[in-house]
Image (spheres, coloured by chain):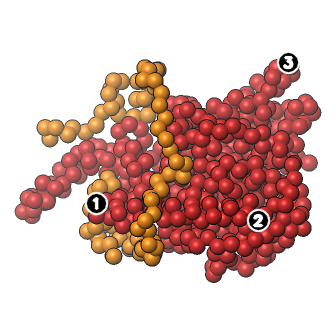
Amino acid sequence: MSLTDCTAAELLADLNARRVSSVEVVKDFSARIERVDSKVKAFLRYDGDAALKQAKAIDDRRARGGSVGLLGGLPVAVKDLICARGELTTCASKMLANFRAPYDATIVEKLRAVDAVFLGRTNMDEFAMGGSNENSAFGPTHNPWNLNCIPGGSSGGAAAAVAARMATLSIGTDTGGSIRQPAGLCGVTGLKPTYGRVSRYGLVAFASSLDQIGPLARTAEDAALLLEAIAGHDPRDSTSVDAPVPKYSQTINQPLAGLKLGLVREHFGPGLDSEVEAAVREAFKVYQSLGATVKELSMPHAKYGVATYYVIAPCEASSNLARYDGVHYGYRTDVAKMNDRLAEEAKSMSAAGHSAAVDQLDNSLVRMYRQSRAEGFGAEVKRRIMLGTYALSAGYYDAYYLKALKVRRLIRGDYDAAFKQVDLIAGPVTTTPAFKIGEKMGDPLSMYLVDLYTVSANLAGVGGIVFPCGFSRSNLPIGLQLQAPPLAEERLLRAAHMFQKATDWHTRKPPL
Amino acid sequence: MSLTRQDVEKVSLLGRLLLAPDELDRMTLQLGQIVGYVEQLGELNTESVEPMAHAVELKNVFRADDVRPSLERSAALANAPQHDSECYLVPAVLGE
């Protein structure tokens, strides 16, 4: 068996026992990337030499008997919207194509401190906006299970890299389902932690009240290891939760006696693919055979999740993305050409006698902002900036933004009520298995509805985990989602691990 | 409520985006569809509901007002499209 087929836990045991070196591990992953990433395109950049250098330093320290951190020489892939000092951080956008971060994100510092090896940067939807990875300015990632299909988004590169055995561990972000949805569609394990559990300092912001960083891995055990390395309070992030971090990797094997699972009636309505429904219901049976009980319950505001999300997220995005002005960093339009055009516009307007229109014409600075942003951002990013600007503009604020914030409270109320009755909510993560590349690109609303089962967790701030629970007839992975009350990641990981000990869906390898 | 092309054009100025005529047409149609979908929130009576801006109920975080080292000027300017090693440079605004 190749090292790339091992789980992180297996590799770590071998590394710590010095049966294998980090250099050997990195070499195998680099070779795998060289061989399959031309088809999958999960990585925007990977630097085998830099990774080898890091690996060698960790190997040397281990050989000298020095102390080695929790991830001791394991390679990790990082989604390309997390700042690492001196390195390109592009957010898969033309806007930031040449941006080199001037500092390390907290999570990068943490990964360095536990001796992770940085393998490379993974592809994503531009600024993490999308559910299919097709919005990357550098081209889409392909689903390792079927190269004609999308891997899910926006952490599609992160999920595909793990599924295709090009990384054992990767870091994604989840604003409306962007870790869980691609995990489900690529057949890997992805965890969105409770809001505030992992510091967002150094993460390029999309919708700040919803964004959360989390792990993608092959197994729940591996996700536990990575979460343990990255979770914790950070004074530099004022929304970071000040609570101790459990040793997730140590408690994963403790059984969950008498687990109570909630089945949400509204998750099994029209639109749910029959194969997905069958696989999810089969997963309930697995849990029942392990001693869990299943209780049906209602979350009456579940169906309003997408509408609420697509007000709040674009509003926050329009504000966060105002910083891309072509002045401080990022793309700037050709100002000389722009000024010539502006002068021509003024001339032709005057000639036509539209003096009022000339007065209203952009000045150079405003035109530079507008043109730089128009040329630097892709279609989906522009759509969300427009949507958010509209919803926040005078006269519409109450009708859209304020209304959505109130419905957000109702959605959170559904969760609070549900968790009084059950330990975890279980259900589908997507309505269908992965769809074809290009299938939904012309219809943004249908793309937004892809997030139906995931957005509510972000609105409420609760955690969720997704892992494979079956395959479609066309051999595409189907995921199961578990959601837990705030800070109950331990419970999510143990419940997922329990399922993975009883089944082998998570061990399947895509035909690459 | 349907969005007009004029609405979208105004929003594009507020959002500091310059949209081409065909983009304005497409955006008018797509934003109209999305806003139409969002209007289902109107079905809910939320009169007595407190808005929720954040999942974690935040309290003020205080710290001493001490001067600490920050990003160096050269690092802050390093990614700027145009600078003179002291300032960011932009097109002239005054005296046009």
The residue that appears at 80% across and 56% down in the rendered structure is: A495
Q: B93 above or below A163?
A: above
Q: Quadrant of residue B7?
A: bottom left
Q: A331 above or below A417?
A: above
User: A58 and A226: which one is in front?
Assistant: A226
Q: For the residue carrying disc 3, how many other residues have a C-alpha within 10 Å: few (<14), some (14-19), or many (20+)?
A: few
Tell me if A413 is positioned left or right of B2 in this view. Answer: right
Residue picked out by circle 3: A64
Badge 3 element: loop
On the image, the x and y values in percent for residue A346 come to: 15, 54
Q: Colour in which chain B is shown?
A: orange
The residue that appears at 53% across and 33% down in the rendered structure is: A236
Q: Amino acid at mark 1?
A: Ala
Label 2: chain letter: A
* Res A261 label: 2
Viewer-nearest of labels 2 and 1?
2
Residues at marks 3 and 1 touching, judged by CB atoms closer than 8 Å = no
